[in-house]
């Protein structure tokens, strides 16, 4: 009877976990950097021709607060972020 080493693939699992953590940290740093900039400068640097509004939700649908803001984007866009139907300008919520 041959004995198999069941732990032989753990390094591959650790490698993929490291990649996931690195990507998440990069995205958070990217968003945090642009969240603190002027909307016009952000739009120009990203090469976006239209107005935009970005918000992030967790798995339960709760809005995430990133760098003290819940939305990033143009104040020309109105969004509804709560069940009461209250409308906010993007960037003010």
Image: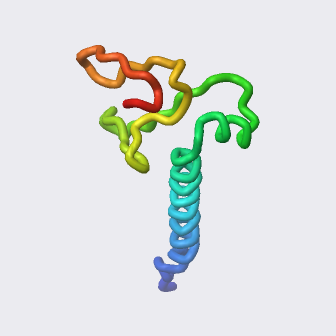
Query: Nearest the camera: 70 or 7?
Result: 70
Q: Relative to 77, say whether 48 is above or below.
A: below
> Residue at the spot x=42%, y=47% of the render?
66
Residue 78 in the image: state x and y as whole percent: 45, 17
- State the quadrant of the C terminus: top left
Q: Relative to 76, say whether 41 is above or below.
A: below
Residue at the far left in the pictured view: 84
Query: Nearest the camera: 4 or 65?
Result: 65
> Residue at the spot x=45%, y=34% of the render?
71
**Tag count:** 0
Query: Nearest the camera: 24 or 51?
Result: 51
- Hey, which quadrant is residue 49 in on the image? top right
- Hey, which quadrant is residue 74 in on the image? top right
Instruction: For residue 1, say whether it is visible.
Output: no
Left-right relation of 89 to 46 = left
Left-right relation of 92 to 51 = left
Q: How is the image coloured?
A: rainbow
Query: Nearest the camera: 76 or 61?
Result: 76
Instruction: For residue 81, say whether it is visible.
Output: yes
Residue 33 in the image: state x and y as whole percent: 56, 52
Left-right relation of 2 to 65 = right
> Residue at the spot x=72%, y=31% of the render?
48
Residue 16 in the image: state x and y as whole percent: 56, 65
Q: Relative to 9, say whether 37 is above or below.
A: above
Residue 38 in the image: state x and y as whole percent: 59, 40
């Amino acid at each position: 009877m041959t004995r198999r080493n069941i732990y032989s693939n753990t390094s591959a699992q650790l490698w993929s976990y490291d990649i996931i953590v690195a990507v998440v940290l990069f995205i958070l740093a990217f968003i945090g950097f642009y969240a603190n900039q002027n909307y016009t400068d952000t739009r120009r640097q990203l090469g976006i021709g239209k107005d935009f509004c970005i918000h992030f939700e967790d798995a339960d649908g709760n809005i995430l607060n990133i760098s003290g803001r819940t939305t990033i984007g143009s104040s020309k866009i109105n969004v509804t972020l709560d069940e009461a139907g209250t409308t906010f300008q993007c960037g003010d919520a």
